[in-house]
Amino acid sequence: MKIDSGSTAWMLTSTALVLLMTPGLAFFYGGMSRAKSVLNMMMMSFVSIAVVGMAWVVYGYSLTFGDGGALSSFIGGFGDWGLVGLEKVATADDGTGIPQLVFVAFQATFAIITVALISGAVADRVKFGAWVVFTLVWVTLVYFPIAHWVWWSDGEDGGKAGWLFDLGALDFAGGTVVHINAGVAALALALVVGKRKGWPKEPMRPHNLPFVLLGAGLLWFGWFGFNAGSALAAGSTAAVAFINTLVATCAAAFAWIVVEKLRDGASTTLGIASGVVAGLVAITPACAYITPLGAIALGLIAGAVCAFAVGLKYRLGYDDSLDVVGVHMVGGIVGALLIGFLATTAVNDGGADGLFAGGGVELLGKQAVAVVATLAYSFVVTYLIAKVIDLVMGFRVSEDDEATGIDSTAHAETAYDFGTIRAGIGSGATAAAPAAPAKKVEA
């Protein structure tokens, strides 16, 4: 099939947009962290790009989108390891009209950000080396298999496919693969690592709310590539995914700050940024299967539900530092299940009709199976991975390092220079006054 230059250009743009989301996440998480660990938090996102990017090329793409033979329902094979032979393939195997390596690169960015999302649950307290090891092992044993279950098919009617794909569960851009997967993995990792020293009695407020808003804006910008790019073409499916991504996020952000106002008496910048992310998460699996009005309804529900869900950690006693569980796991579940109610083939005949479109409960049941399977597999395997790493090399920094701050102890850097400030003696001074001793600043 001849290469479609328009679709190829759109997919190259979408790939760059999705990659930008991980630095955006670094700002979002970094701003929510304390000043003494902001660099470590951002490094966890950036090193995910480095590690997962290489693993994806060497064997990740092959395991995710390759044929695993007798095991093809559950995992791919190594037929495309190292992308050997794909350099000159003109188009994707499914005839989308884009070079196959463009699809490879696009999907790499999904694997990268999924791992980075998990890091927010363990801010302030994990060894950087242990995180690097976890990144490689987790993406191999958890992300690649689940992505294969949901998205892989050999493209033939009645042919081989991942078992959730074959079941007919719908996940257009990663509600199960990315968000439920990362959210429940974050819960498992937080349980293994344990609570921060002083949590929840000591206040651990975000140190830089402008960073949080900047990160949310970059995530929203990149998410148009995440969702609309998953159409793999510049056409009507991308258009509906694009508008739904816009309006669902608007609705969720609004719902979150309304809940805050009614519950706490004030709407906050942290709240609207969190609402933005909750809406983006929830619309991800559903963006190409529902109407724009359905997207508004989905966003309102997701924003309100996630606003309440972030408080569960205080009731249940797990220290999810930056609310990965409450936003990504819960938001992903909301979005995946609402497909069973709101989906309609009037929008996308490649989907199915949900309950409100006369399709009965069949699709809802399939969505529930996908949600439960993702939750169970990801939690169990992540917990085991984290336990083994903890036993072998230790996952948590010492109490002294945690109190001092991981930025200085692990990276020999600090985000902010609180050193001496030189001040002039007057308007005509030619020499600066002696600087006052630097004061210790508590994060």
Image (spheres, rainbow, N blue to C red):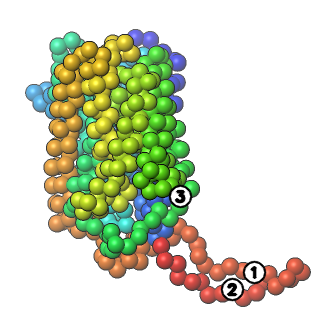
Q: Nearer the viewer, residue 310 or 26?
A: 310
Question: Between marks 3 and 2, how big is the CA–CA gap?
Answer: 30 Å
> Badge 2 local density, few (<14 within 10 Å), some, or many (20+)?
few
Check disc 3 and report its element: helix, strand or loop. Answer: helix
Query: Can residue 46 be seen in the rendering of this structure?
Result: no
Q: How many marks?
A: 3
The residue tagged 2 is 435
Q: Nearer the viewer, residue 52 or 372?
A: 372
Check disc 1 and report its element: helix, strand or loop. Answer: strand
Q: Is residue 157 above or below residue 16?
A: above
The residue tagged 1 is 423
The residue tagged 3 is 209
> Badge 3 local density, few (<14 within 10 Å), some, or many (20+)?
many
Question: Between marks 3 and 1, how big is the CA–CA gap?
Answer: 29 Å
| Residue 353 image-quadrant placement | top left
Kindly indicate whether the residue at mark 2 contacts the one at mark 1 (C-beta within 8 angstroms). yes
At label 1, the amino acid type is Ala
Check disc 2 and report its element: helix, strand or loop. Answer: loop
Q: Position of residue 191 (x, y in %)?
A: 22, 60
Question: Between marks 1 and 2, how big is the CA–CA gap?
Answer: 7 Å
Residue drawn at point x = 56 percent, y = 69 percent: 416
Q: Position of residue 84 (x, y in %)?
A: 32, 31
At label 2, the amino acid type is Ala
At label 3, the amino acid type is Leu
Lower sequence index among marks 1 and 2: 1
Q: Quadrant of the N terminus?
A: top left
> Closer to the observer: label 3 or label 1?
3
Lower sequence index among marks 3 and 1: 3
Residue drawn at point x = 47 percent, y = 51 percent: 261
